[in-house]
Image (cartoon, rainbow, N blue to C red):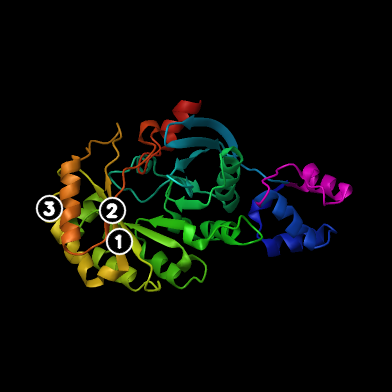
Amino acid sequence: MEILASYNLQELRVKFQELGFEPYRANQVLGWVYRKFKDNFQEMTDIPKEQRTLLSQAFRVHTLKPVERIETKDSVKYIFRTEDGSIIETVLIFERDHLTLCLSSQVGCAVGCKFCATAKDGLFRNLTTAEIVDQYLWVQKDAPSRIRNVVFMGMGEPLANYEAVRKAVEIMVNPWGIGLSKRRVSISTSGLISQLKRMAQDPLLRELNLAVSVNAPYQYLRELLMPISKTNNLKELMQTLADHPYPPDRRIMLEYVLIKDINDSEAHARAFAQLIVPYRNKFKVNLIPYNPDPSIAFERPSMERVYAFQEVLRSHHISTFIRLSKGVDVFGACGQLRSKRLELVVK
């Protein structure tokens, strides 16, 4: 039995023709799945009854199995099990006037950032397109209102799973799919230069919001915190981002996790500012006080230290924000998602 979210519209129209259905039936079915969030073919009343029966035998909507739902005042963490028994999680974040869904793109992660709990498990495998899309479908069925914002900031490095993520985005932003605005879909990456260059040439992905984890103003320190920097040099990364084909009114978000006594001094802030100043109109900065994890020795700096860092950047006329992550209490914040820990919870 095949998973419906494995197909884009054109592929599904071809598949339906092979099954003897009129191609336009694909548009109808996707409308039920992505706009009305129905997962029972028998409820799709504009499809002939005999075709509904055949669809039920050939396809299913979901590939993930919901395992647990953990709610706090500012977020809900959803734990899912894949068909091969892997555990992933998705986080729904309650913003002031909208909902944001944080999606995972891999089981684990191979990037190896020293401050990230997900990296402790290594990479098990990439998620499929259907597994990525199904996170949205399950959470939307439970959400109090329509989810308009999606961020690829969960488990994994999205650009290391480029094709599956791209196809999931195609499903999410097209009118025949979920119909999200491209301006409301964000890709967060550790800075894979070759994939960023590929993204810049991609008519679909280059229009999405882009957030890049930098976390250090010096090459040697970034290598210590993010070993991937050894093959993705900081200077080349900044030039690659400066060359990204955004229109003048849009900026790339540079993410900087502030870790106590590691990268949070005013000297670090001044050095970071010097990296940005030549391309000031291309970037804005998100300062993220480190989200503690019991498996990692790092600590969160004081807010006084965070504000001092921000003030240095602002004195260089760099647009800078402080992001206090939601979901910390249930290990659902940035850098806290960990499949091994989740396996212990759900077994």
Q: Which residue is mark 3?
A: 266
Give amino acid for label 2: Phe
Taking the magenta stretch, the answer to whether it contains residue 94 is: no
Q: Secondary structure at mark 1?
A: strand
Q: Position of residue 136 (x, y in %)?
A: 56, 46
Front one among 209 and 319: 319
Q: Which residue is mark 2?
A: 321
Q: Which residue is mark 1?
A: 284
Which comes sooner in the sequence, label 3 or label 2?
3
Give amino acid for label 3: Glu
Identify the residue shown where x is 25% and y is 68%.
280
Give amino acid for label 1: Lys
Q: Secondary structure at mark 3?
A: helix
**Real-space CA distance between mark 3 and mark 1, rounded to the nearest whole angstrom:** 18 Å
Going by the image, does 291 lie left or right of 347? left
Answer whether residue 102 is visible to the viewer in this image.
no
Q: Position of residue 168 (x, y in %)?
A: 56, 56
Identify the residue shown where x is 61% and y is 62%.
174
- Do tag 2 and tag 1 residues touch (Cβ < 8 Å)? yes
Q: Position of residue 217 (x, y in %)?
A: 19, 58
Identify the residue shown where x is 28% and y is 67%.
238
Going by the image, does 151 lie left or right of 222? right
Answer whether residue 117 is visible to the viewer in this image.
yes
Going by the image, does 290 lie left or right of 205? left
Which comes sooner in the sequence, label 3 or label 1?
3
The quadrant where residue 277 appears: bottom left
Residue range (magenta):
35-59
Instruction: Say if 161 sits above or below 101 in the image.
Output: below
